[in-house]
């Protein structure tokens, strides 16, 4: 690898905070950031799973990882997590908002409580947590915010009215974050994954017919593998994306292109 490429994509000296880092997309992105050289703070509710993720990072080449157990669905935990995130490695200048929930309820079954739970974790937490971290990024003169959108940011799926509303909101939140903070050197973008093997998509992966149908709806002809997220993660977290902000990048094998 040339020094030019290394400088453009290197995350050495950077500090990342990744929510939802105990499994799935959040864990994959945390490992990618660490392999790129970043020191990573892993945030999730499950301490045991977080410890496993941190051990995997710390035993591999690349950056290092620390854990922060927090239930971000509780409002008072958000500010606490943001403050504690700076303790292991200093103030984060990369944030990945990957924590999320999908209750898969029909419209008739959505309650005020389940609506608030979904919108709170999927949409409100990315804003309020990121806002807590902005002063530290602003002091450095740079920062990279990566939100997680969805196919449901653009299309309606059955039993997804609350989840779809939250992920549609993420697309506009990402643009609004870019408008608010990009002049401070803080770029904000989102990844919209297609179908990947995660806890949230387990009902799809447990249904072979549905899984095959989803693969056939892509331009590439297959569903996603978590490693397919590595390149876009590194790009959006690094200096390579310094003039890219307010964008939603679909990593869906061409699902939304057809």
Image (cartoon, rainbow, N blue to C red):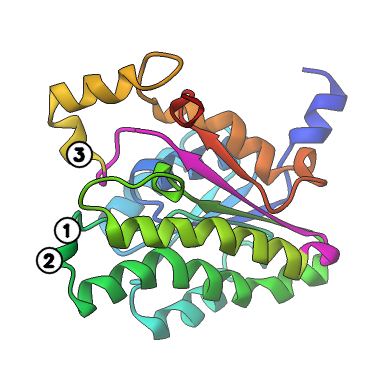
- The residue that disc 3 covers is 202
Q: Position of residue 90 (x, y in %)?
A: 66, 66
Image disc number at residue 109: 2
Whether residue 199 is in magenta: the answer is yes
* Secondary structure beneath label 2: helix
* Direction bottom: furthest residue: 76
Please state which of residues 107 and 66 is positioned toward the viewer in this rendering.
107
User: Circle 1 is placed at which residue position?
Assistant: 105
Residue 121, visible in the rendered structure = yes
Residue 181 in which image quadrant: bottom right
| Above or below for 18 versus 129 | above
Q: Nearer the viewer, mark 1 or mark 3?
A: 1
- Distance, label 2 to label 1, CA atoms, is 6 Å
Nearer the observer: mark 2 or 3; the answer is 2
As measured in the structure, the alpha-carbon distance from the residue carrying label 1 to the one carrying label 3 is 15 Å
Residue occupying image coordinates x 66% and y 65%:
177
Near-viewer residue (141 or 103): 103
Give, as a single range, the part of the protein colored magenta.
182-200
Estimate how packed mark 2 is, as few (under 14), some (14 to 19) or many (20 or more) residues with alpha carbons within 10 Å: few
Residue at 49% x, 24% y is 254
Residue appearing at x 32%, y 20% in the figure: 215
Taking depth in this image into account, of 213 and 177 the one nearest to the observer is 213
SS type, badge 1: loop
Q: Is residue 204 above or below residue 135?
A: above
Q: Is residue 222 magenta?
A: no
Whichever of callouts 2 and 3 sits on the residue coming sooner in the sequence is 2
Few, some or many C-alpha atoms within 10 Å of disc 3 (few <14, some 14-19, many ≥20)? few
Label 1 neighbour load within 10 Å: few <14, some 14-19, many 20+: some
């Amino acid at each position: 690898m040339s020094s030019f490429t290394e400088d453009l994509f290197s995350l050495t000296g950077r500090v990342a905070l990744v929510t939802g880092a105990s499994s799935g997309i959040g864990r994959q992105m945390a490992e990618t950031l660490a392999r790129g050289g970043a020191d990573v703070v892993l945030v999730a509710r499950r301490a045991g799973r977080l410890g496993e993720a941190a051990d995997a990072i710390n035993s591999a080449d690349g950056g290092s990882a620390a854990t922060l157990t927090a239930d971000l669905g509780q409002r008072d935990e958000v500010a606490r997590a943001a403050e504690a995130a700076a303790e292991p490695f200093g103030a984060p200048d990369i944030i990945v908002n990957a924590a999320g929930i999908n209750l898969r309820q029909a419209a008739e079954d959505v309650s005020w409580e389940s609506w608030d739970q979904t919108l709170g974790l999927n949409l409100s937490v990315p804003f309020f947590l990121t806002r807590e971290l902005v002063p530290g990024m602003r002091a450095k003169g740079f920062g990279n915010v990566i939100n997680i959108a969805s196919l449901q940011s653009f299309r309606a799926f059955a039993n997804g009215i609350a989840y779809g509303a939250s992920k549609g909101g993420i697309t506009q939140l990402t643009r609004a974050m870019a408008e608010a903070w990009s002049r401070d050197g803080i770029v904000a973008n989102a990844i919209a994954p297609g179908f990947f093997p995660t806890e949230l998509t387990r009902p799809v992966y447990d249904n072979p017919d549905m899984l095959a149908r989803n693969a056939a709806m892509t331009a590439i002809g297959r569903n996603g593998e978590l490693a397919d997220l590595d390149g876009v993660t590194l790009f959006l977290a690094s200096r390579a994306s310094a003039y890219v902000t307010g964008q939603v990048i679909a990593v869906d094998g061409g699902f939304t292109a057809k």
